[in-house]
Structures are given as C-alpha cells and as structure tokens.
Image: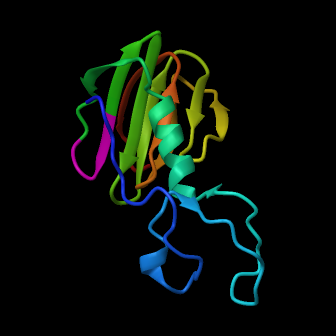
Amino acid sequence: MTRVYWYDLVDDGSDPSEKEQNFGMLRQPVTATTANPVPVTANAPEPAAVVQAVAARMPGGRTYAGTDGLSAPADSIRFTGSGTTRVVRATAARDLTVSATGPVTLVGSWGRRTVRQPTDGRFTLAADPFPVFVEGPVNGVGVATPQ
C-alpha cells in the first residue's frame, strides 16, 4: 500500500455536541466557551491521531512474518526486520501468556513503554481491543491457562 486516505483530517466544526463536526484527526483552533472549556490555539491532534502514529511507527520498516496461532478473540501478529515486533490484541478481554528469555518492552496504543521481566520464562499480558506492541526475546504468545 502506498497511500492512505481518511475522512476528515481536520474537524469540520468546533461544537463538541455535534458528532458530524468531529470526525477529524485534528481539532480546529477554538476559543474557550462554556460548552468547550479548553481552548485550542492550533490544529491539535485528537486521540485517534496519536494512536495511528504509534501504530504506524511500531512495525515500520518490518515485514509481516505470520501469527502466533491464537484463535479468536485474541491475535498476535509478528513483524520482523531489525528485531521482531508483535502486535497483540483481543476483541474481548483475555489474559495471554508471553514466553520470553529476557526483558520484554511493551508499547501501548498511546506510546507508553513499560518493561516486563518474565518469571520462569513467562508473564501474563491482559489483552483487550487496544493493541499492545511487544518487543524483545519473545518465543511465543498463547492463551493463559486459569490457575
């Protein structure tokens, strides 16, 4: 894919109660009002723009390398290149087990990084509809077994 198009780049209006005016990835500059108490002095990114930027950056330059074989509602997709990045999510909340030989970096949809140290070669990851990018010496991702 060489191009991406989206509707709308910038909100069509500034009334937060009018959903048709608020489809943009960026907010219009607005002055503070009772209905919209936060002024915006320039086009400001909406949450979707931040998440899109993180999702584009994390596997950037890597090649699709398959899945970890999970079944719905969970998924773990591998991208390889300079290291491996997995995109892990679940359409319904689900605990997953990450098997790893050392510290693993988790990057959430908002770009926040945390490091998890496996105990006995694994740790539990709570997956939900928001993707988590998993980097490090991971051997696999599977469904956690109840204890």
Residue drawn at the location 37% of the way across and 31% of the way down: 141
Check the picture and name the quadrant holding the N terminus: top left
Furthest-top residue in view?
Answer: 82
Residue drawn at the location 57% of the way across and 36% of the way down: 107
Residue 114 percent location from the top left of the image: 66, 35
141 vs 35, left or right, is left
Nearer to us in this view, 23 or 42: 42
Q: Identify the colour scheme used.
A: rainbow
142 up-or-down from 24: above or below = above
- The answer to which quarter of the image holds residue 88 is top left
Residue drawn at the location 70% of the way across and 82% of the way down: 36
Q: Which residues are magenta?
A: 71-76
- The answer to which quarter of the image holds residue 81 is top left
Q: Does residue 144 appear anywhere in the picture?
A: no
Nearer to us in this view, 6 or 103: 6
Residue drawn at the location 36% of the way across and 22% of the way down: 79
Residue 30 percent location from the top left of the image: 70, 72
120 up-or-down from 52: above or below = above
Asked whether residue 139 is drawn in magenta, I would say: no
Residue 129 percent location from the top left of the image: 40, 55
Nearer to us in this view, 1 or 138: 1
3 up-or-down from 102: above or below = below
Residue 8 percent location from the top left of the image: 42, 60
Q: Does residue 139 appear anywhere in the picture?
A: yes
43 up-or-down from 119: above or below = below
Q: How many numbered dots are placed on residues in this image?
A: 0
